[in-house]
Amino acid sequence: MILIALLLSVLALDRAEDLREAARRGDLERAKALLAEGVPVDAKNRYGATALFFAADKGHLPLIQLLIERGASTEVSDTFYGMTPLVRAIDRGHEQSAIFLLKHALASGHLSRESFDEILEESKSSGRAEVVRFLESTAPPAPASEAPPERIDLASLAGRYRNEETGEVFAVETMGEGLVIRLGEKTTALEAKAAREFALEGGAGSVAFGGRGGMVEYASLRRGSETKSFRPIEEGEIVGGDGTIAESSTNLRPEAAAPAPWPSFRGPNGSGIADGQRIPLEWDSAAKRNVRFATPIEGFSVSSPIVWGNRIIVLSAVSGASDRTFRTGLYGDVTPIDDLSEHRWLLYALDTRDGRIVWTRELERRKPGTKRHSKSSQANATPATDGKRIVSLLGSTGFLYCHDFEGNLLWKKEIGVLNSGWFYDPDYQWGHSSSPILYDGRVIVQADVHGSSFIAAYDLQNGNEVWQTARDGEIPTFATPTVFRGPTGDELVTNGTRIRGYDPKTGALLWHLGPNSEIPVGSPVATSDLIYVTAGYPPIKPIYAIRPGSRGDLALPEGVDRSEALAWSKTRGGTYIPSPLVYRGYFYTNENNGLLVCYDAATGEIVYRARIGGTGGSYAASPIASDGRLYFTTEEGETFVVQAGPTYRLLAKNRVEGVVLSTPAASDGLLVVRTLDHVYGIANP
């Protein structure tokens, strides 16, 4: 009986997802049939979103009308973003659908005067002319009588907050059953107005706290007509870095070591470290200073370069529609680029000495199986090599390719189109980006996708599958795995909504750890004694320092930050896109906006916190380290060089022309910087 009940429960979930899928597609007849079969109209997914959310997101007005007619609630908010179907319709610009939902909300008394006014102002600022005309011609709801605000854990709001532009700091503390705010020398009581909104005593202003997934990610402080945004400060932070380049930095002369390859994403075992490789401190492409070459590449890609011997290997994708739509900067638009024209995927080999293209191979010519994000390409994954074979992965074609160093195809293996995208809705395709890695004659691929996620190993000699392990419950993630090698045994470590360790020889699960972000992007980093994993998206932005050799469920009890399995951990401080760096006893993270935090790698204690270069910017490339220096590259093509160690010290500011999301490669005196469509070779004379 228990088994039957479980099967019925699974079938019910599947039918509810069928209804949400019909809403996405605007399939009115399918939705009617499912509702007639008894599928609940307000059945929710794991984020609390119902079919009405997805119909509103796509602007399918007849389906919205059907769902409302069958009793769908317009009041429900999803549990992650706090969105309603009405908000989603307005945000997506579906004005007729938004007006229908507004009429329903007004008629049912479910739209407050406050929400009415907010929607009107937002619609004005975003150019929703039809919604504005409707609201301005409609009598607003009467102001609601004062109601007690929703109860919230006030302690979760306590802490210090900093404005990044001015450096201003305020503190929020619990006092009795309420909160106070300390602004300079003045302490002011806060009066609750809503769950996370408070008025300053005496009508001096207000403060509101916000964030996704239940997190407190920011605070907005209003005093008079001025509103400023503040971010939470980690306890013990020391803030530094004013953008001034340290004197005498050019006198640093690193010691040379034997040339070492950069064989995969972030170099040897994904470490990002290139000691002894004598890469330059300073360069400028406009002035042609220390630029050995700048080779144009057809198409564009965010795949990173690799180097072995005198060869640089890069991937590119060429749109048949010549669509080069690409957006840099800090934004949260989830809408993919709708270019499914026939593409060509190209593999290039360049000479490290002069940037000359030695050979080019067309891997595939077809329509891609998925769309891409506006900060992505149709060639995202970085190739990997052992010096004899070059392995490339194209998620949107669903194939692995293996070539020799002369460009001859050795084998091609179909693994299925990898549809990775917004966890909330599979229609929002962003492109698979986890790169293949090589381990003991095997190619390992992490495929976290909508549907059935898996991790698998393939024979490097012939492409035959060696093992495949399902990643149950995993949604799209974008990190590249790494392997820890040590006395406790080798461990294949993956970042995901659950962090996992596998036996790389068999694919057997060894341990798992949560909680984690919903969109893990940064790759794990392994040292001789610890494995570091971070993520920077709600509902938690953790940092974990994991001791190898652990087994089973490594989750910590609430309020505990270390254990036998974890040397230390933090529930916030993890970063979103750039992977972390562990170098000479320190652990470094840099956020998308260039906020650099240095930790003691052994203890997790914060050593300093600085804004890289003393300025803003947007970062997607991961940092690398070489000869006592840290290299941080912005999307705008600037690279800031910072001294490694316990004191922030800016050594140089450099630039290439073009957009950079790829992580640079370093080998034998050459720094390889990949823009969307050029490969730069940076070297001292």
Image (tube, helix red, strand yellow):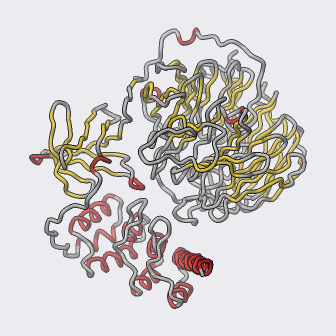
Could you tell whether 547 is left or right of 186 in the image? Answer: right
Residue 403 at least partly seen: yes
Q: Is residue 615 left or right of residue 350?
A: left
Q: Residue 22 at what x, y percent from top left? A: 55, 79
Quarter occupied by the N terminus: bottom right
Instruction: Pick out the residue farthest to the bottom.
Output: 36
The residue lying at 20 percent from left, 31 percent from top is 184
Q: Position of residue 329 (x, y in %)?
A: 48, 44
User: Would you say residue 621 is visible in this rendering?
Assistant: no
User: Seen in the image, is 339 located left or right of residue 538?
Assistant: right
- Extreme residue in the left direction: 202
| Residue appearing at x 63%, y 36% in the figure | 525
Residue at (56% x, 62% y) in the render: 428
Instruction: Report the front residue among 144 and 488.
Output: 488
Quarter that holds the C terminus: top right
Left or right for 92, reference 219: right
Please name the residue shown 53% across and 19% down the image.
643
Location of residue 106 with respect to 280 vertically, above or below: below
Residue situated in front as seen by the camera: 675 or 590 = 590
Residue 232 or residue 358, whichever sits in front: 232
Location of residue 126 with respect to 75 vertically, above or below? above
Count of labels shown?
0
- Location of residue 104 in the rendering, given as x and y in whole percent from the top left corner: 31, 80
Locate residue 60, reporting x and y percent.
Answer: 48, 77
Location of residue 310 with respect to 501 vertically, above or below: above
